[in-house]
Image: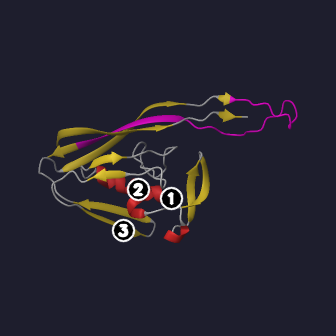
Amino acid sequence: YNDTVGDSNDPANGFLPAGAIVNGELVQEYGGGICQGSTTLYGAVIRSGLEITMRDCHYSPSSYCPLGLDATVSYPYLDFRFRNNTPYPIYIDAYMSGVTLTCTIYGYNDGSWDDIEVVSWMTSSASGDIVFETDNSIPVGEYRLKSSGKTEYNASAVRKYYKNSQLVKEESLPDSYYPREDTCY
């Protein structure tokens, strides 16, 4: 993904500031929001039966896709990569209509399946602890919220191949881990 899109942190490449997660905080950054493109492409790739070779999930679950089905990118550190594991070329058709990105992949199907269903689910979750830190700059007995914390999630996903509405194959997709943060006062 990064090789094709280029350095999304460089405004000279046409990227504008938008919401991005940096050290667990939402900030305005060049290339912010680019993960919606990589996640949309990931959704098309997994529904096309192509091989995933590199994929990372976000630091927190994404609001624009089901848990465990996001694909974060951050040039040059995090990338999304896949491989055309068919004997013929593929064609990727991606376009915007308003604020909606659509991605369709055309290619070879060996005839062993006619539909792919993608299913994800939470495998576990855990809330962070409440932590109190001493701050001598505020009166005794007074508390100030420093960090509201977040819940930890683990998720798994599979793609199910169907032929004539009958399940013929099932493959695990990459697992996802979204770490917890303690609530700090």
Mark 2, other Cα within 10 Å: few <14 / some 14–19 / many ≥20: many
Q: Relative to 13, is 57 above or below?
A: above
Closer to us: 27 or 6 = 6
Q: Position of residue 15 (x, y in %)?
A: 52, 67
- Please state which amino acid type lies under the numbered disc 2: Ser
Q: Which residue is mark 1?
A: 33
Mark 2 element type: helix
- Please state which amino acid type lies under the numbered disc 1: Gly
Tell me if I can see residue 123 in this picture: yes
Q: Do labels 2 and 3 touch, CB within 8 Å? A: no
Closer to us: 78 or 60 = 78
Left or right: residue 66 versus residue 22 is left
Q: Do labels 3 and 1 touch, CB within 8 Å? A: no
Q: Going 60% across and 35% down the picture, which residue do you hit? A: 181
Type of secondary structure dominating the magenta stretch: loop
What is the image's colouring? Answer: secondary structure
Q: Which residue is mark 3?
A: 95
Tell me if I can see residue 14 in this picture: no
Left or right: residue 44 versus residue 135 is left
Which residues fall within the magenta stretch? Answer: 131-160
Q: Position of residue 38 (x, y in %)?
A: 41, 56
For the residues labelled 3 and 1, the Cα–Cα distance comes to 16 Å
Q: Position of residue 106 (x, y in %)?
A: 22, 61
Mark 1 element type: loop
Most extreme residue toward the left, as rendered?
111
Q: Which residue is mark 2?
A: 38
Q: Going 49% across and 69% down the picture, which residue do you hit? A: 13
- Please state which amino acid type lies under the numbered disc 3: Tyr
